Image (tube, rainbow, N blue to C red):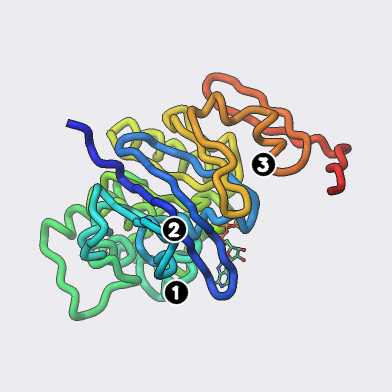
């Protein structure tokens, strides 16, 4: 039996404020296929992830037959749907109250909330799960520390822990290593690598192509709200495609399944 795609977006229009981000946009994400989305600032990557998590919706009356289906279904109770995803983004990081302690950041994932409140109760099993995740991410020593007093890298680990609390099938990661030093970013990606080996599907938005781990099979290039190209990683992470994506000459090197991009600083893009 053919499994339904994780996400099937068909011919939608999306506006944010007065800006039309997507026009007649379609894209499918298959189950079990970790995918990276690459594109210049403003190309629509975060907007796409927000459609995925249903924080944003297409404009009513998108052309003809249009839909967003998750696991083959258009209609979902969003709380049920969100249990299947874990999300890490800077926006989420900014929304956290500085006073929320580490353990509560992790536990808040149970209710997909920002922080916990006295009305939320957690079972012994849920608390045990939170401890186990902190142990796995090596952040137990920060369990009582207020979020606002943690470094960016520490905060990012707590958000990953929060995203893992439902043991979701899919992780949506919007520039997860932005602001992290080299070692912290490498540590973060070592954890992601392990999670992918354990069967998690990752949907990664990044500006750093060396972060597109060997386990990520597919790459989608987004440019000005359209899919420039999409396919197996070795075909897409090439000098011609990346040069077209960024309108500048870019050399691409590959070593042991990792890719590196080197922009040619002398290149002047042709004027239209
Ligand atoms: N709240 C908003 N109101 C109006 N326009 C917005 C809003 N949020 C985003 N946009 C616009 O939508 C477009 C796509 O934004 P989006 O955040 O999806 O880009 P992105 O690819 O994630 O960029 P970046 O790499 O800088 O994170 C941009 O032109 C942006 O200015
Ligand atoms: Mg973004």
How many neighbours does mark 1 have within 10 angstroms: few (below 14), some (14-19), or many (20 or more)? Answer: some
Give the labeled residue for mark 1.
98
Residue depicted at 40% across the width and 58% down the height? 64
The answer to whether any part of residue 155 appears in the image is no
The label shown at residue 12 is 2
103 up-or-down from 243: above or below:
below
**Which residue is rendered at x = 42% and y = 56% of the image?**
88
Instruction: Give residue 137's position: percent from left, percent from top.
Output: 35, 46
| Alpha-carbon span between mark 2 and mark 3 | 22 Å
Q: Position of residue 146 (x, y in %)?
A: 40, 70
* Left or right of 145 on screen, residue 73: left
Q: Which residue is mark 3?
A: 245
Q: Secondary structure at mark 2?
A: strand
Distance from Cα at disc 1 to Cα at disc 3 = 38 Å
Q: Quadrant of ligand 1?
A: bottom right
Q: SS class of the residue under badge 1?
A: loop
């Amino acid at each position: 039996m053919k499994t339904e795609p994780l996400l099937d977006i068909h011919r939608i229009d999306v506006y944010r404020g007065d800006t039309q981000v997507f026009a007649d946009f379609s894209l499918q994400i298959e189950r079990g296929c970790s995918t990276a989305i690459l594109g210049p600032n403003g190309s629509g990557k975060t907007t796409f992830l927000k459609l995925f998590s249903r924080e944003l919706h297409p404009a009513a009356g998108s052309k003809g037959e249009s839909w967003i289906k998750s696991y083959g279904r258009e209609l979902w109770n969003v709380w049920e749907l969100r249990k299947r995803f874990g999300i890490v983004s800077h926006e989420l990081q900014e929304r956290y109250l500085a006073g929320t302690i580490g353990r509560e950041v992790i536990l808040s994932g149970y209710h997909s909330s920002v922080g916990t409140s006295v009305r939320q109760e957690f079972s012994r099993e849920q608390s045990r799960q939170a401890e186990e995740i902190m142990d796995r991410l090596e952040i137990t020593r920060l369990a009582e520390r207020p979020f606002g007093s943690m470094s960016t890298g520490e905060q990012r680990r707590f958000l990953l822990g929060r995203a893992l609390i439902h043991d979701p099938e899919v992780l949506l990661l919007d520039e997860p290593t932005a602001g992290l030093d080299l070692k912290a970013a490498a540590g973060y990606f070592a954890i992601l690598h392990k999670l992918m080996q354990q069967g998690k599907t990752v949907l990664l938005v990044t500006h750093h192509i060396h972060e597109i781990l060997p386990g990520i099979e597919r790459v989608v290039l987004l440019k000005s709200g359209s899919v420039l190209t999409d396919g197996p990683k070795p075909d897409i992470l090439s000098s011609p495609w990346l040069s077209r994506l960024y309108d500048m000459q870019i050399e691409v090197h590959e070593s042991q399944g990792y890719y590196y991009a080197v922009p040619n600083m002398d290149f002047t893009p042709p004027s239209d």
